[in-house]
Image (cartoon, coloured by chain):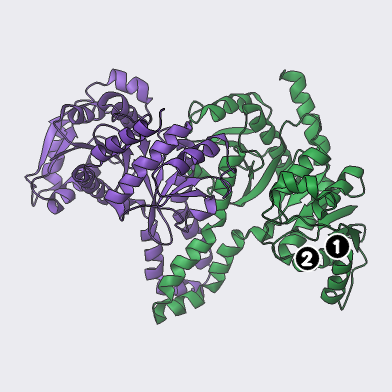
Chain colours: A purple, B green
């Protein structure tokens, strides 16, 4: 298996990406080849320096002379930079030279390139980003976390199918509970989109548990939480900002006196546990579900650990054969429910 | 001034409401009369018991024989229960017998009754719930927090105008920074609704600071945060669930050993500060802005403190004369921008 990795993408590229790739190579089977996509001479020099004690044989290079910056307009960048690490890396997935692409680069460009150049899986109307949302019991999968700002009810039904399969194969357990994010428990509560989507989900084969509200997310009321990409992105970014807020509010007070300082010292392990549960780096990256290949999208600020976990996740996604399952279930559905 | 209070509304009515009213009466000027709306005999007996040492002269009664339950369908309940505390209390506002209504009862029924029976202010297309959102620097006002699941761009512009005036008059400071909740900083990022609303807001007289993302909310990037009622309600309920999640995650670990227990004891004041900042009871309730009167909506689970603070807030809203300002600014706007 070959995993193409965007060596030029992310706030701390290429160093952090190379370090993550080295760490992943040490953990993964030798059958997995990690292909760093980017500027060859720079990468070779960096790799030699970063892996001076041991250069994993399973880390190789693929040339891409350009890189798309974080702030660039995706549409323009994809037109102009045909030799960028994103276009070249996803091109490898399209041509079969690689089975997955991992990037911490410009999210909009990665999404657009994956959707329009690698292409959608048969039957998928809109690919979606699935993002891990930690909760009191474990984790849920929230989708769409930002690929589609405006959605139709059928899109939400498909997110439910893709998310359910992803949870089952990659996270844990069968018959995941699928919840529709809304603003009231009853099927009639919500906006026009969710009320119509509720009806579609209720008729589906999914283990649909109905509407879940904002207050239910952290309780773990559903394994898969469905929403449009606007709501999902707002919630995801809000959730990611919680750890910082909690830490700084408590820190302010702690700094104020000795009693609190000692208390904080004694509680270090408890805080560490809290931070770990909400540390998005643990989860590596978010899959773009519904494309004809595998693509893992990482935070721009990813650390080597996050890149390592994302590469590891890409391997698991490819091994799961989830795309076949998605195609099969969407085919089944369209046989029963005319679009 | 007379403030009508829904004595039959909320999970712990009427006791909690009566207690809150007594506390408010002790703090407020004698010019403010608090009118408990509900079943007279029950209220009189409860008040006698709860205020056995001192019965504030400014707490009076107004008879309403029915009460709308928390789970009832608002539309049906309003048709059938014409003598409910909600219909009667808001009727007092409409007729001028009271200047404001405070309720911890069925939110949907309060909203619907306020909007359709008290009526909207001239020029307001959609009234909105403004909710306090604590952040690292202080608080922001988020609106709409749930009155309108589906919105048009003009509604969001009006939310900006009403929220800006409310922040200025009731919270603090002039020229509040108005931000549009979206999923990217650029004006072209977002969904169809926010992209159009951005254009309207940018042309307005408001101190518009552009899009704010989910991660900016807790940073206090804007004083007034505008969104549709679906997104607002999801975010609000999610935010309200954070304190419980943080506490329980840390508590689990704390219970595990003596070191952590001592640490937690020493940190009690720091935790208290954190909880206080996120304690929605401090803020009393949320105003329904844009109706021709004043209406404060409280949590169903409100404590006496929350009810007290909500009554206090109602007095401040009435004294601020904010409704005149809203009418004036919307009139100004429609003179300049034909709808």
Q: Residue furthest bottom?
A: B258
Depicted A117 relative to depicted B316: above or below:
above
Q: Residue at x 25, y 50 (%)?
A: A309
Q: What is the chain identity of the residue bearing mark 1? A: B
Depicted B222 relative to depicted B60: above or below:
above
Residue B333 lies in quadrant: top right
- The first of marks 2 and 1 along the sequence is 2
Residue under disc 2 on the same chain as residue under disc 1: yes
Q: Residue at x 36, y 25 (%)?
A: A74
The residue under label 2 is: B14
A163 to the left or right of A95 = right
The residue under label 1 is: B39
Q: Position of residue A256 (x, y in %)?
A: 53, 67
Q: Residue furthest front?
A: A336
Q: Position of residue A165 (x, y in %)?
A: 31, 45
- Check if mark 2's residue and mark 1's residue have beta carbons within 8 Å: yes
Disc count in the image? Answer: 2
B322 to the left or right of B283 = right
Q: What is the chain identity of the residue bearing mark 2? A: B
Question: SS for tag 2?
Answer: loop
Residue B174 lies in quadrant: top right
Q: Position of residue B339 (x, y in %)?
A: 71, 20
Q: Quadrant of the N terminus of chain A?
A: top left
Residue nearest the viewer, comparing A227 with A59: A227
Q: Is residue A102 among what the camera can see?
A: no
Q: Residue at x 56, y 45 (%)?
A: A187
Question: SS for tag 1?
Answer: loop
Q: Is residue B249 among what the camera can see?
A: yes
Residue nearest the viewer, comparing A246 with A258: A246
Depicted A65 relative to depicted A26: above or below:
above
Of marks 2 and 1, the one in the foreground = 1
């Amino acid at each position: 298996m070959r995993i193409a990795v965007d060596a030029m993408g992310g706030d701390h590229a290429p160093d952090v990406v190379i370090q993550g790739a080295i760490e992943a190579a040490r953990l993964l089977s030798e059958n997995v080849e990690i292909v760093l996509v980017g500027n060859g001479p720079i990468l070779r020099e960096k790799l030699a320096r970063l892996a001076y004690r041991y250069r994993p044989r399973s880390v190789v290079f693929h040339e891409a002379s350009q890189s798309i910056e974080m702030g660039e307009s995706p549409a323009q960048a994809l037109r102009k930079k045909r030799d960028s690490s994103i276009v070249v890396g996803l091109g490898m997935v399209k041509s079969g030279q690689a089975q997955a692409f991992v990037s911490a680069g410009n999210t909009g460009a990665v999404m657009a390139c994956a959707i329009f150049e690698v292409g959608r899986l048969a039957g998928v109307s809109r690919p979606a980003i699935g993002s891990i949302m930690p909760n009191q019991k474990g984790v849920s999968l929230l989708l769409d976390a930002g690929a589609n700002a405006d959605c139709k009810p059928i899109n939400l039904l498909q997110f439910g199918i893709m998310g359910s399969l992803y949870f089952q194969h990659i996270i844990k357990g069968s018959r995941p509970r699928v919840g529709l994010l809304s603003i009231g428990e009853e099927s009639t509560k919500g906006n026009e989109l969710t009320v119509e989507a509720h009806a579609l989900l209720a008729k589906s084969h999914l283990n649909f548990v109905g509407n879940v509200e904002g207050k239910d997310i952290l309780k773990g009321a559903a394994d898969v939480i469905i929403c449009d990409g606007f709501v999902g992105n707002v919630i995801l970014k809000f959730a990611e900002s919680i750890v910082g807020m909690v830490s700084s509010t408590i820190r302010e007070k702690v700094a104020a006196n000795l009693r609190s300082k000692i208390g904080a010292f004694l509680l270090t392990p408890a805080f560490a546990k809290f931070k770990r549960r909400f540390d998005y780096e643990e989860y590596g990256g978010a899959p773009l579900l519904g494309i004809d290949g595998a693509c893992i999208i990482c935070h721009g600020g990813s650390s080597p650990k996050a890149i390592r976990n994302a590469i590891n996740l890409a391997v698991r996604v490819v091994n799961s054969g989830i795309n076949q399952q998605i195609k099969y279930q969407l085919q089944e559905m369209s046989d029963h429910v005319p679009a």
